[in-house]
Image (cartoon, helix red, strand yellow):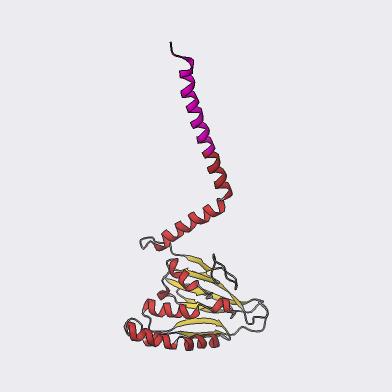
Amino acid sequence: MQNANSYKKPVGRILKVAIWVVSIMVIVVLAAFVFQKQIFTFMATKIIQQRLLNPTYKKEDGLYAGLAGTGAPFADINRVGPCIVVEAGNNLYVIDAGPGSARNIGLMGFDMGKVDAILLTHFHSDHIAALGEMMLQRWAGGSNAKPVDVIGPKGVETVVAGFNHAYSLDASYRVAFHGAATVPPSGAGGRARPFDLSSEEDASIVVVDKEGVKITAFKVNHSPAYPAVGYRVDYK
């Protein structure tokens, strides 16, 4: 006859394994609960990146918006300056140019060379700091022969002229290095397209009406920054 202890040993081992398995499952469940926000953000980011960077992925025709930057004026390791990318059919628009956002647009899988226009809501530094880089990438990225339109309320002329002047030497270096076929001299910089809203509090104006895309500017109160606007984008 077998000794009773011979039965106890395998039962004891099985019990220990079961306790370990249950403990690990409890830890995993607790970790998933505690870090659910981080896990969701990580998974969502990976899915979005795979779809945007996959050249075979085809989105349905429609209106899409991506946040290329949501940061404030102060340094933030996790966020860059304010910027929204809007894709409507074959049209691509950028709203605001916060610092660091130009590179994020590329990392999100959008082609800066295909940007139709850049729209500015107001002229705080954290909303315009990357404008020069955006104009450069749009020019060089698409070998564009015409400067990109920079749309904004009155005052945008001063902003665009300043960036054009600041980047004028760099533009000459790019042409000399890459050649006029890659970076046509006529396409450097930006072209200001200012608009003026009436004095009414609820004033608005259509600033883009192209290929089913309608962008309407409307007044917002962002005192002391004046003028300041928001944009509504409609597609088809």
Residue 36, horizontal then vertical, whole percent: 56, 50
Q: Is residue 12 magenta?
A: yes
Using the image, determine if residue 186 lies above or below residue 235.
Answer: below
Identify which residue, 131 or 27, lies in the foreground. 27
Identify which residue, 206 or 136, lies in the foreground. 136
- The part of the image, by quadrant, that contains residue 78 is bottom right
Using the image, determine if residue 116 lies above or below residue 52.
Answer: below
Q: Is residue 16 magenta?
A: yes
Specify the quadrant that holds the N terminus. Answer: top left
Residue 30, horizontal then vertical, whole percent: 57, 44
Using the image, determine if residue 26 lies above or below residue 233.
Answer: above
Residue 149, horizontal then vertical, whole percent: 47, 82
Q: Residue at x 49, y 23 (%)?
A: 11
Residue 180, horizontal then vertical, whole percent: 33, 85
Using the image, determine if residue 17 lies above or below residue 215.
Answer: above
- The part of the image, by quadrant, that contains residue 82 is bottom right
Q: Residue at x 44, y 67 (%)?
A: 107
- The part of the image, by quadrant, that contains residue 187 is bottom left
Q: Tell me the chief SS of the magenta region.
A: helix
In the image, which residues are magenta?
1-23
Identify which residue, 22 or 201, lies in the foreground. 22
Identify which residue, 11 or 137, lies in the foreground. 11
Total marks in image: 0
